[in-house]
Image: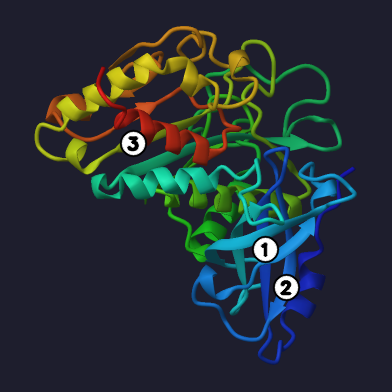
Amino acid sequence: MSVVSNAKLLEKYLSLEQHGAVQVEYVWIDGFNNLRSKTKTVTKVPQSAAELSEWNYDGSSTGQAEGHDSDVLIQPVALFNDPFRGGDNKFVLCETFNPDGTPHKSNYRNACKKIMDAHADSKPWFGLEQEYMFMDPQTEKPYGWPKLGYPEPQGKYYCGVGAGKIFGRDIIEAHYRACLYAGIKISGINAEVSASQFEFQVGPCLGIEGGDHLWAARYLLERVAEDFGIAVTIHPKPIKGDWNGAGCHTNFSTEEMRQEGGIVAIESAIKKMAKRHMEHIAVYGEDNDQRLTGRHETGHIETFNYGVANRGASIRIPRQVGKEGKGYLEDRRPASNIDPYRVTGIIVESTFWPEN
């Protein structure tokens, strides 16, 4: 079932005076790697997440608690402008905690923040490339695909222009503008290789900000698509067969890598990551084996390799980086459904892993 929002009717109510009240949407990650949210009224405009109070929700309804002890606490950590309500209204990304104050087992941000703080002097930057696909709730097929059969094979859709090549440009443009309004560090969008597959990029972001801004952008994508009556999937292989899967390529650098001669630090980090390949794969997304097959611009899940300008490698060193001898690396292994805190955390952890 799909219901499209009545934007014109809604605007009648959103234009009403709030008389000093501010609506804050609390957003958190549930036990299934999905997003949930609910709204609180506050009496002044918050300038930071730290000004907002802790709250709670029923974890038995989100896969995070048992019914007899269902309270899960949420602590605001990253504040953004709300593009749906506008004005002074906000939405805030939250961490989840158990009643005793310990991080919930589904809270990967807490551990990631400790890693980022420990290596803050290295100034780790991240750029995250989120691939996704629009799905039609009526047909349960990708948006714009024929009800029977398949569209033309891959080839004309990547960065395509024109009817029959792009399905959902209005949605991706709306999402892009919503992210800019919110204050998310979105750096671009493009159509991807499969029909109805798209990508947005977040970054460069410093440390924990990478995960925060990716999750915030995912939240806005779900909300914008909801208005259009379209669903979003970030499964790494949403369509079986000869169609590209979906990844979340993770670009990474430290201050040392960005300086003259930084290629030495880049190659050192890659060699350390190679030794922990399967540890990385373990947190690089569910069902990633369906995507990392060695085909469709991927390396094979069981092997590790890297190279300059090689999109079939586990890690790609961009051509310009190889030429200039400094810059960043692109880890092409993460799937589209990653928790970015787990991925950015282990990349920094491996980069500074002690030498044997």
Q: Is residue 34 left or right of residue 254?
A: right
Where does residue 15 sit, x and y in percent of width and height? 72, 82
Where does residue 80 sit, x and y in percent of width and height? 54, 65
Task: Please tell me whether mark 3 sits on a helix, a strand or a loop.
Answer: strand
Task: Please tell me whether mark 1 sits on a helix, a strand or a loop.
Answer: strand
Residue 285 occupies which quadrant of the picture?
Answer: top right
Mark 1 lies on residue: 26
Where does residue 174 sit, x and y in percent of width and height? 60, 55
- Mark 2 to mark 1 CA distance (whole Å): 7 Å
Q: Is residue 328 left or right of residue 65?
A: left
Mark 3 lies on residue: 252
Which quarter shows the N terminus? top right
Residue at the limit of the structure toward the left, as seen here: 260
Residue at (74% x, 35% y) in the render: 135
Looking at the rendered structure, the kind of residue marked 1 is Tyr
- Mark 1 to mark 3 CA distance (whole Å): 29 Å
Where does residue 261 sit, x and y in percent of width and height? 10, 31
Q: Which disc, if any, is residue 209?
A: none
Query: Is residue 17 in view?
Result: yes
Looking at the rendered structure, the kind of residue marked 2 is Lys
Q: Are marks 2 and 1 in contact (CB under 8 Å)?
A: yes
Q: Is residue 169 left or right of residue 203?
A: right
> If you read the primary sequence from the N terminus, does the residue marked by circle 1 or circle 3 appear first?
1
Residue 32 occupies which quadrant of the picture?
Answer: top right
